Amino acid sequence: MTIFTHLYKEDRAGGVLLGLLLAAGLLVPVLNLGLGEAHPLHLSTYTVTLLGKYLCYALLAMAVDMAWGYLGILTLGHGAFFALGGYAMGMYLMRQIGSRGVYGHPLLPDFMVFLNWKELPWFWHGFDGFIFALLMVMAVPGLLAFLFGWFAFRSRVTGVYLSIMTQALTYALMLAFFRNDLGFGGNNGLTDFKEILGFSLQADGTRAGLFAASAAALALGYLACRFITRSRLGKLCTAIRDQEDRARFIGYRVEAAKLWVFVFSAVLAGIAGALYVPQVGIINPTEFAPLASIEAVVWVAVGGRATLYGAVLGALIINYAKSYLTAAFPDAWLFGLGALFVLVTLFLPQGVAGLLQMVPFRKKGGTP
Amino acid sequence: MPMRSDSYRRHLLLATIAAVLLVLSPYAAGLARSAPGTGFEEGMTLLLEEDFGRKAAGVDMLAESSDPRAESILETMLAGELFYLKENRTLVQARPEGDGFAARAILGDADLGTVAKRKLKKIAINNSLRGQLESALARLRLSNADAGVRAEAVNKMLATVTPESRAQWAGYLQSETDPAVQAALRAALALTVLRDGSAGPAERRAAVAQLAGHLHPTVRNELARLLAGEPEAPIRKAAQRALEGIDARLAWLDFFETFFFGLSLGSVLVLAAIGLAITFGVIGVINMAHGELIMLGAYTAFVLQQLLPDAIGTALVLSIPTAFVVAGLVGMAIERTIIRFLYGRPLETLLATFGVSLILQQAVRSIFSPLNRSVATPAWMSGAIQLNAVLSLTTNRVVILLFSLLVFAGLALLLKKSSIGLQVRAVAQNRAMARAMGVRAARVDALTFGLGSGIAGIAGVALSQLTNVGPNLGQAYIVDSFMVVVFGGVGNLWGTLLGGLTLGVTNKFLEPWTGAVMAKILVLVFIVLFIQKRPQGLFPQKGRAAAG
């Protein structure tokens, strides 16, 4: 039980977050499946899926926070890792369709039959196995982040240059994935999924299960991020963020530390994407759009940088606001989002988490 | 009066050529021919017939009539805009407008207003009639007073010259005085020889020599055909040499054309990036709303054209200073209200200005609708500059290339020669020192930001001539602009110029190999790798400024 007492003493907000996630992971499926539709506490499957989507975004936000909050890399391209993880999962789901596609081909997904392809491209092999797909969900974004970081950090590209480079990365990937001949469904992406691990994606039970899996992934992700940020590596990262040259002169291998944390962050984003795709039922190149990545940065900015739980909070608040505003006032959303960018950077540099920290939660007489 | 006799002879010859061609035309066989001038009315009535053969005869009669109105009638017919009114069977020119057609009488030029569709009947044309219309028009144009029109007409007819028309071409060559038209006519003459099975070896040889260096595709095909079937070895050799010469010139022209397209793309990149280079270089912040300032410039051009619908050229010229002021003021407003508070926090500036870009995009979407708008191209910018038979440069691209060089020169002069330019450079090099010397840095920041934003507006006016104007116009160029700035080296105008042109040319040379999208991706990858080697770009800043 040490971890719980530790959480209670050292990381009150994190404890609250984990508790809420645990409660949600258990309660939401019960409220959805266990109660009849007439019951006042019943949660519709639509709501469950929506909440699951928010949790995936929250995991992505946490990945961005690792890079931006703890490493000082303002990444404008984390959507690329998210989308790559999503595509890896999408490929698995496509292979699961089998001969139930519109064209009924036993091996080829519909879009390949439509493009008159005769055999499966080499990079589609293996994706019929779930374990292999899971590996790819982590390996592909991780590898890309490794290559990118290897080149960028070694030559000491920092600051706005690095930000623009990450944006160029996701922009280039978006252009590439829009092409039909790349072999990922072009403009339409991958969609029309049927089942995951033998469970129908349309079934309420699967949706609830995916929600629970997202909540678990977010909780585990939080613990992993927390473990890293509190380790010696995490301390070094903070040092690099605040004074990169000084950390280097002391003798730390700044590039290696940055590289590993960046790769970890990309893998996290990939997992978020992989959980996201079966819930929304589609993955297409617009996930690579620079705007998608930069929105994730705003979630972190609103929630509060370098707190982890702030990123989760920001992602949930903004996405709820987006769902509400795009339905209620479709024209107002971009105005609101734009104003949020400006106002948060000008007046709320610490985000909502900073506001919370100003409120004295401690009991009277408690030691600081 | 040599002039008059020349033109008289030309007309006579033309009539003869036309007559010969008419005999060759399968449609016209068996039709009674009428004397020049009298066929016009009859040809007009024949056009109304349903039967394509009789229509074809009508076309030939019009072409033969040497009536000055014939050319425009045939042009209208070729464009598919020739109709007749069902009630009195008079020919009209009509274009779709709203529910009906905007019609005007083809003879007399009277405007008939909008006519309902059911009152009109279209003069339908088919493919063979289209070919015949084209050659008839070419024949008419051979008598045009403008040498350029005559040369083009000859070139158009090269593909269809027949050995029988040889004497006519020779006669026409004698009466021609313009060297360009003469060259085209000599090629036509040589082609009649090569296409004539009975021509002797000496004649063929002379014809091959005549065709060497001629770039028209027909000439190349004819030489290739000759090479395959020629019995005489020396002539084969000559043809081979002529062919190689033509191919070498074609390859060079192809290279030149690609290079020009590259420069054109590069000039657009330079225009889009140069404002960014100034603000980034001086203030050290990235303005993510730069693309939207370009967009505002493009919309300024659109709005001015809407306000002055009768003078789109004037509106376009006026929109250059207007866009500069509009975008400049918006830029200064952004600097005074947001960026000023974020100096020293470049990443936050990036986020905040990105928010501004979203707001500007949505504002444009709300005001002008999310649909693309098109800005009209004035007459003096449309069309192409024909350099020779295969190479032509689109006028608007040439104008924009020159325009961007002009803007660059103006900006370089401003920064080098004016006192405000001196202050801008001082602040860019060392802000603290400049302030110590009495430069009001805050004022310089605002002015620089206004200047950079204003140039973005001008870039938008230029871009409105190349693409449609829409809310996403800026986004399409923002990543490219950053690449140019990063590649060229921050805070260096010449780096931006060279960087933009290099990237444009590289892109266009890669395109045939890889396709447009892959070329763009490859260029991005190249820049990422280039930054590894030279993080400060092509022209790094020197001294202490580099440390920042």
Image (cartoon, rainbow, N blue to C red):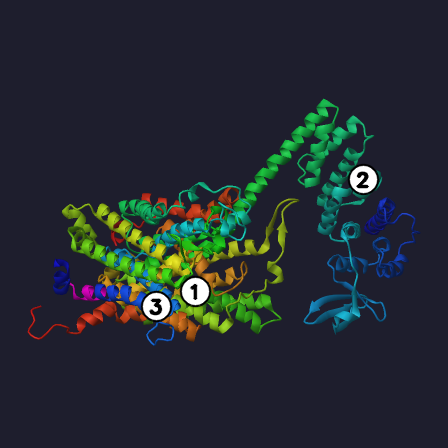
Q: Quadrant of residue A368?
A: bottom left
The tag on residue B292 is 1
Dominant secondary structure of the residues highlighted in magenta in the image: helix
Residue A12 located within the stretch drawn in magenta: yes
Residue visible at 58% across and 38% down?
A: B251
Residue visible at 38% across and 67% down?
A: A45
Residue A88 seen in render: yes
Q: Are circles 1 and 2 on residues that touch, CB within 8 Å?
A: no
Q: Are circles 1 and 3 on residues that touch, CB within 8 Å?
A: no
Residue B143: x and y in percent read: 79, 51
Q: Quadrant of residue A56?
A: bottom left
- Graded by Cα atoms within 10 Å as few (under 14), some (14 to 19) or many (20 or more), the crowding at tag 1 reads many
The tag on residue A32 is 3
The residue type indicated by label 1 comes to: Glu
Q: Which residue is mark 2?
A: B162
Secondary structure of residue under mark 3: helix
The residue type indicated by label 3 comes to: Asn
Please tell me which of labels 1 and 2 falls first in the chain: 2
Q: Are marks 1 and 3 on the same chain?
A: no
Residue A258 located within the stretch drawn in magenta: no
Chain where mark 2 sits:
B
Q: Which residues are magenta?
A: A11-17
Secondary structure of residue under mark 1: helix
